[in-house]
Every structure is written in C-alpha cells, then in structure tokens.
C-alpha cells in the first residue's frame, strides 16, 4: 500500500502534511502521524490516532513527527505501535526519511481546493501556557522567492485559493535581510500572481499587523474578508498572566478600524477557557468579548496544564468548571454565529466549491452547494435557509 499521512492540529500541520505526501510519494507500506501537542487533549488524540492507524495497517511502518514527537518524545517512543520518531524541525528534509527528493512533476495533485503555504515556523514568544516553542523551535521565515515558488506550484495544480499560514504568521520576515513585514509578503504574492483570485491568511497576532497588511485586509478585494485573531482571552489581568502582548482594548480598536473600512469583514478568534486564576469576573469578560467583537469563527480551548510551562505552576481552576465555562463560550459563539448567518440569507455570496459538495464564501461562511458544483470553481449563490449539522452550522443554497 502507498504512504498515508495522518494530520492533526493546526493549518500549518495541514500544509506540511501535503508536502510530506509529495516527499514520500514513492514509499510503500508507510504511515506517518503528523502530531499535535498544543493541549493535553491534542496529545491524547495523537495517541488515539497512532493506535487507530496501527489497527488499520498492522504491517506498515509507522513513524511519528510533529510537535508531540518533540514535547512527548519519550512517551510516544514507548508506544508499541510506533516504529520511530522524526524530529519536527527535520520532517520536510528528505534525508530524515532516507528517501530521494521527487521530481517536481511527480508531485501529486493537492487533496484540497484550498492550498496552504507554510511561510513561517516556530515562535520566539513565551506565552505562559504554551509548549509550541518547545515543539517548533525559534521563529523562521520562508524567503519571498520560495513562497512565490510554492504558490506557483499550487496554482499550476489548480488550487482555487491560497492560504498563508505559520505558527506565528505575523512575525514573518523578522529574521530575513531588511526585516520585511507580512504586509510586504502579501503584496508580493498579489503582484506576482494577478490571476490569483483568493488569498487568505491564517491566525494573526493583532499587535503585529503592520500598516501595509492593515490596508490590504481593509481594501484589497483578493485578500479575503476574514480575520482570525490570536486573542486567547478578554480579561486584561489574565492576558498579562498569559504574557500576551495585547490588552482587550487593543483588540476592540483593531476590529473597529477594520470593520469601519470593510464592513463585510468576518472575525474569528482563539479563546482559552479556565486559565489559571480565572475568576467569575474574568470569565464574564472573556464571554462578553464574543458579542462585542462579533466573533463568528470561534475556536475554544479548555485550558489544560502543560508540564514545564509557568501557567502549570499557577493556581488552577477546577476541571469541571473549565468544562462549564468552555461550554458557555461555545454556546455564545454559536448564538453570535447564528445571527450572522441569518443576516447572509438572500444575499449573493461568491463560494469556492470543494470536493464534499460544500464550499466557503469569501467571509468563510460554509455553504452547501448543489450536486453539479465543480470543485475548485468559484460560484455565486444566494443562500435561502440555515442548515445545522452535528459538526457545523452553515447556509443552504
């Protein structure tokens, strides 16, 4: 059987998994688990994925890479299902896998109509809850020429949308000659590929959004009107204890400035429930931020202590209370999202059709399309009803 890559976690992992499929295309009887370690739950899911993969392919060679392969190295290496670990920083180097680099023409077509391009890796910050710097190392930027080459490869293979992604995307460029900012990279991509209809950005740290990037987000039609912010919390004291570099007011001001210039822009965010020392008032501040900013694409993470981080040594919130608060955040996110989706009914949306019969509008609203939609094409539809599934809430065309 051919190589199988199981991807967990962030969009960066998704992008790297696509590159791994190309890098390992000539291998046989190989399973790679590209792991995640952002939370204790992510590590549990990694171990579960390893066991599931071994049951499905008992005779295959099973290798593990990704953040958990660094942070939980000894524990994963001790699993009987695992044949070996590949260092996270080396996973895109053919020498680490002992394979020959395939010719460019041998790379397979992407599995997605949306192509992810990892332009940055690692992180130089020290948020008190995070182990990602341990798993990814220091911040490293992909030079402009290499980014353009990656984008060109994806477009040549028919990708309908390109997403620039990274661990700390807005820190891109600080380690390159002249210390360019992310706005300069976005402009370079747009200038190099006039036919690129849709460029999207993954999670952004608001305090690092430079002036040129702000202008592009606010006024460039080919940059999608969707911003996902790495907020983490809505209470200033908790933000300080997290060692975040922004306060609540900074986020409120940024959203207001962007929304004033581009009213249709949709905002999402990462929020952590139950961070150590979080009292009822701090939780209310976190909860109220969802409606105040109109966060319609919400990722809620129940806090879980990670060994070796400062937050793990702080006074902890009871696990049952963390789960309760996470549920409240998700419920408020669903309410705000539902109102937003209802407001899109009867309005034309330009949707990138995907392979499962759905697609995403420019604002990243999920839309169910008709059976004749062609993956990779952009269609204009007018949604007429809301649809609710067990995993997502979207629009029905």
Image (cartoon, helix red, strand yellow):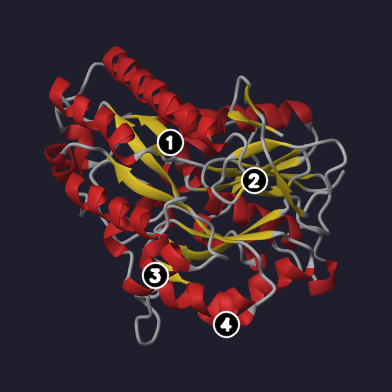
Which marked residue is nearer to the observer: mark 3 or mark 4?
3
**Residue 105 coordinates in the image, percent (x, y):** 84, 72
Residue 97 occupies quadrant: bottom right
Q: Could you tell me if the residues under marks 1 and 2 are in contact, i.e. CB atoms within 8 Å?
A: no
Mark 4, Cα crowd under 10 Å, few <14 / some 14-19 / many 20+, is few
Work out whether residue 268 can be spotted: yes
Residue 106 occupies quadrant: bottom right
Specify which label sits upstream in the sequence, 2 or 4: 4
Separation of marks 1 and 3 at Cα, in angstroms: 24 Å
Numbered mark located on residue 348 in the image: 2
At x 65% / y 52%, what residue is drawn? Answer: 17
Separation of marks 3 and 2 at Cα, in angstroms: 25 Å
At x 54% / y 50%, what residue is drawn? Answer: 11
Residue designated by label 3: 215
Separation of marks 3 and 4 at Cα, in angstroms: 23 Å
Specify which label sits upstream in the sequence, 1 or 2: 1
Residue designated by label 1: 298
At x 23% / y 37%, what residue is drawn? Answer: 234
Q: Nearer the viewer, residue 304 or 52?
A: 304
Separation of marks 2 and 4 at Cα, in angstroms: 37 Å
Left/right placement of residue 168 relative to residue 191 reads: left
């Amino acid at each position: 059987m051919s190589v199988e890559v199981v991807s967990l976690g962030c969009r960066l992992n998704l992008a790297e998994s696509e590159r791994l499929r190309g890098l390992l295309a000539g291998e046989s009887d190989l399973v790679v688990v590209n792991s995640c370690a952002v939370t204790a739950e992510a590590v549990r899911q990694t171990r579960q994925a390893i066991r599931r993969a071994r049951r499905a392919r008992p005779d295959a060679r099973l290798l593990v890479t990704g953040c958990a392969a660094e942070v939980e190295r000894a524990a994963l290496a001790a699993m009987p299902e695992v044949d070996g670990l590949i260092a996270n920083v080396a996973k895109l180097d053919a020498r680490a896998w002992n394979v020959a680099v395939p010719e460019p023409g041998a790379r397979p077509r992407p599995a997605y109509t949306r192509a992810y391009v990892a332009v940055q890796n690692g992180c130089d910050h020290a948020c008190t809850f995070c182990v990602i710097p341990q798993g990814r190392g220091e911040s490293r930027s992909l030079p402009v020429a290499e980014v353009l080459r990656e984008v060109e490869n994806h477009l040549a293979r028919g990708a309908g949308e390109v997403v620039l992604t990274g661990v700390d995307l807005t820190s891109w460029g600080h380690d390159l000659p002249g210390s360019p900012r992310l706005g300069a990279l976005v402009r370079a991509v747009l200038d190099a590929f006039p036919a690129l209809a849709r460029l999207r950005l993954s999670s952004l740290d608001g305090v690092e959004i430079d002036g040129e990037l702000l202008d592009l987000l606010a006024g460039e039609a080919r940059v999608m009107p969707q911003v996902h912010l790495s907020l983490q919390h809505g209470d200033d004291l908790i933000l300080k204890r997290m060692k975040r570099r922004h306060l609540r007011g900074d986020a409120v001001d940024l959203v207001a400035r962007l929304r004033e210039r581009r009213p249709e822009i949709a905002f999402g965010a990462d929020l952590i429930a139950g961070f150590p020392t979080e009292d009822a008032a701090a939780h209310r501040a976190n909860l109220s931020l969802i409606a105040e900013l109109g966060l319609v694409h919400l990722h809620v993470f129940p806090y879980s202590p990670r060994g070796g981080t400062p937050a793990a040594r702080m006074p902890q919130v009871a696990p049952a209370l963390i789960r309760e608060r996470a549920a409240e955040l998700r419920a408020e996110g669903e309410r705000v999202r539902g109102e937003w989706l209802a407001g899109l009914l009867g309005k034309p949306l330009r949707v990138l059709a995907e392979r499962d019969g759905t697609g995403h509008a420019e604002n990243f609203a999920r839309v169910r399309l008709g059976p004749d939609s062609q993956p990779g094409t952009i269609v204009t539809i007018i949604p007429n009803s809301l649809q609710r599934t067990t995993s997502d809430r979207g629009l029905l065309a």
